[in-house]
């Protein structure tokens, strides 16, 4: 947790402690890393009357279950910034898919992939398509769909050629944790090393 706390301390020192985008990203990283209790604490730091309501809603939705969480993600999808809106659609599609609401999930995941493609955000579009590929519980899961959210983020960054230390810094994890996830990624995708992972990931953008 130390790297995460250090990042937020640095943000606070530069006057960004209440930056809604920063908080939302921080909450998502905490949730992906399994730090749910800390994520809830951080989400509560979002200003109640935030001018960036859709992004604030996304931050709260990450730690809110049930219909309330879905309602918050509906708001997140209305973000005026296309990238933020697409992230809302991706999270909502993922939540709906896991709730068994596959038709509604597909609508949002398709929209997320379309927006990400338009923005040239190939890794994010791939994430949306991974969710689409795993919609049917009775079908064989695509390899990428077997990765957890944290593993997918690590796979994308490593495939870009980033060393373990850089990946750890970007995701606020320890190098040991990144290496642990990498071992799991290699096993699930059937690849032997970073080079093979990069080749594999390059075929998944479309």
Image: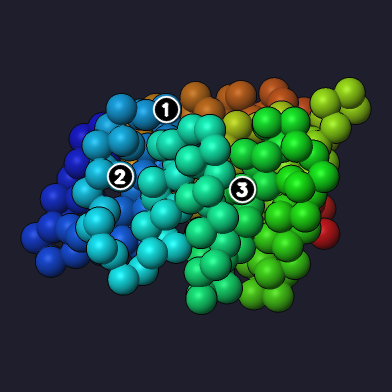
Q: Secondary structure at mark 2?
A: helix
Q: From the viewer's perspective, is the residue at label 3 or at label 1 nearer?
A: 3
Q: Of label 2 and label 1, which has the lower sequence position?
A: 1
Q: Nearer the viewer, mark 2 or mark 1?
A: 2
| Residue 4 image offset from top left, x and y in percent | 26, 42
Decide: few, some or many residues near mark 3? Use Cα within 10 Å; few <14, some 14-19, many ≥20.
Answer: many
Q: Is residue 41 left or right of residue 126?
A: left
- Which quadrant holds residue 101? top right
* Viewer-closest of 76 and 90: 76
Q: Looking at the rendered structure, which numbered label has been put on residue 34?
A: 1
Q: Is residue 165 left or right of residue 134?
A: left
Nearer-the-camera pick, 19 or 125: 19
Give the numbered dot on residue 1: none
Point 48% across, 40% down: residue:
68
The residue nearer to you, when weighing 199 against 120, is: 120
Task: Tell me the quadrant of the picture where the C terminus can be found.
Answer: bottom right
Snapshot quadrant of residue 61: top left
* Residue in view at x 30 percent, y 45 percent: 43
SS of the residue under disc 3: helix
Taking the image as shown, residue 21 lies to the left or right of residue 18, namely right
Marked residue nearer the N-terminal end (3 or 1): 1
| C-alpha gap between disc 3 and disc 2 | 18 Å
Say the numbered circle drawn on residue 92: 3
Which quarter of the rendering shows the N terminus?
A: top left
Write down the residue under mark 2: 43
Q: Earlier in the sequence, mark 3 or mark 2?
A: 2
User: What x and y, as percent, mark residue 69?
Assistant: 49, 41
Give neighbour class at mark 1: few <14, some 14-19, many 20+ (Cα, 10 Å): few
């Amino acid at each position: 947790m130390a790297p995460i706390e250090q990042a937020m301390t640095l943000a606070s020192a530069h006057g960004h402690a209440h930056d809604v985008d920063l908080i939302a990203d921080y909450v998502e990283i905490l949730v992906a890393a399994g730090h749910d209790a800390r994520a809830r604490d951080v989400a509560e730091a979002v200003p109640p009357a935030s001018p960036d309501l859709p992004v604030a809603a996304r931050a709260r939705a990450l730690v809110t279950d049930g219909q309330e969480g879905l309602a918050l993600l509906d708001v997140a999808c209305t973000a005026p910034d296309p990238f933020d809106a697409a992230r809302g659609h991706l999270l909502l599609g993922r939540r709906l898919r896991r709730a068994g609401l596959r038709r509604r999930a597909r609508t949002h995941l398709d929209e997320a992939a379309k927006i990400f493609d338009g923005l040239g955000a190939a890794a994010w579009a791939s994430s949306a398509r991974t969710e689409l590929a795993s919609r049917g519980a009775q079908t064989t899961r695509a390899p990428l769909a077997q990765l957890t959210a944290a593993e997918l983020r690590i796979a994308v960054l490593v495939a870009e050629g980033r060393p373990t230390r850089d990946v750890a810094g970007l995701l606020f994890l320890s190098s040991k944790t990144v290496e642990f996830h990498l071992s799991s990624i290699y096993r699930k995708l059937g690849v032997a090393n970073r080079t093979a992972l990069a080749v594999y990931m390059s075929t998944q953008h479309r």
